Amino acid sequence: MLIEYKNHKIFAFSDTHGLNDRIDIPKDADILICAGDCLDEDDMCFLHDDFLRFLNWYSHLDAKLKIFVPGNHEVFFELNPEETMRITPSSIVLLENSGIEYDGISFFGAACRPWMFKGTENKVPKGVDFLITHGPAEGHLDNKAGCQVLKAMIDESKPKHHIFGHIHEEGGKIEHTDTTTYYNVSMYNQLINQESFRQQYLREILGRNEEQKLSFFELMYCIALSIKVFVRFITKRR
């Protein structure tokens, strides 16, 4: 989701679940925010190969600022936070109950994977420009599964914007209130629908009879997609 704010173009996303390379990131986005769940499945090992691949992909994206806030699928942030922070490249800003200011814009990342519990919440600076969590606050694009403690924290701190994900069904939606604009930036359903379309398109092409010839572009698409699938298969086996 692209957000234009204070002469910057901010692209925020979450819940890619291993489909990171299929995101269409605007070339002119100079600030990137990932609100967690970049992995396909939970893993009890902090040195998860998929996470290392994500870090490599994310760190090489062309943006001046790249922020990452972990989700519930990045379970190793709970098990071994020190080691996870150590392997995170310096080009990625990891916000774990912490904040930064960049070119007059304030960001704060709070651990909410996907909920937080009373007494564990961190104090968010009042009026921060962007609060980033993985889970939603109760009553805001949450499909009735949002966090009550986070809601109370937002009611008190009144951030200008709240970026989050986790609830796939509400992905891509925006909600405005008097004090805060809420963005559910989950991309999972969108990415899955794109993949389903590709697979259906491929089945339709390969299912034609021999008298029907493929166009040049259809043939190139089939070849490119086959190569991509093969590379992903080989990479997974390593």
Image (cartoon, grey):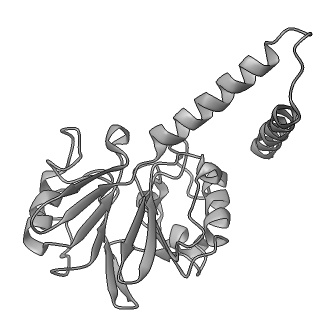
Instruction: Judge whether 234 appears above or below 65 on screen.
Output: above
Q: Say if residue 176 shows up in the picture.
A: yes
Residue 207 placed where, x, y %?
79, 12
Q: Residue at x 30, y 53 (%)?
A: 135
Q: Out of 64 and 214, give the one closest to the viewer.
A: 214
Number of numbered discs present? 0
Residue 45 appears at what percent x and percent y?
A: 57, 52
Q: Nearer the viewer, residue 175 or 106?
A: 175
Residue 122 lies left or right of residue 156; in this view the side is: right
Q: Is residue 36 left or right of residue 193?
A: left
Q: Residue at x 17, y 80 (%)?
A: 127
Using the image, determine if residue 156 lies above or below residue 44.
below
Residue drawn at point x = 24 percent, y = 59 percent: 182
Q: Toward the viewer: 22 or 6?
A: 6
Q: Quadrant of residue 61?
A: bottom right
Picture coordinates of residue 138, whole percent (x, y): 15, 49
Indicate the position of residue 162 as horizontal and vertical percent values: 26, 64
Q: Is residue 41 at least partly visible in the picture?
A: no
Q: Quadrant of the N terminus?
A: bottom left
Return the residue found at the far bottom: 103
Left or right of residue 21, residue 17 in this image:
left
Q: Give the residue at x 53% y 33%.
A: 193
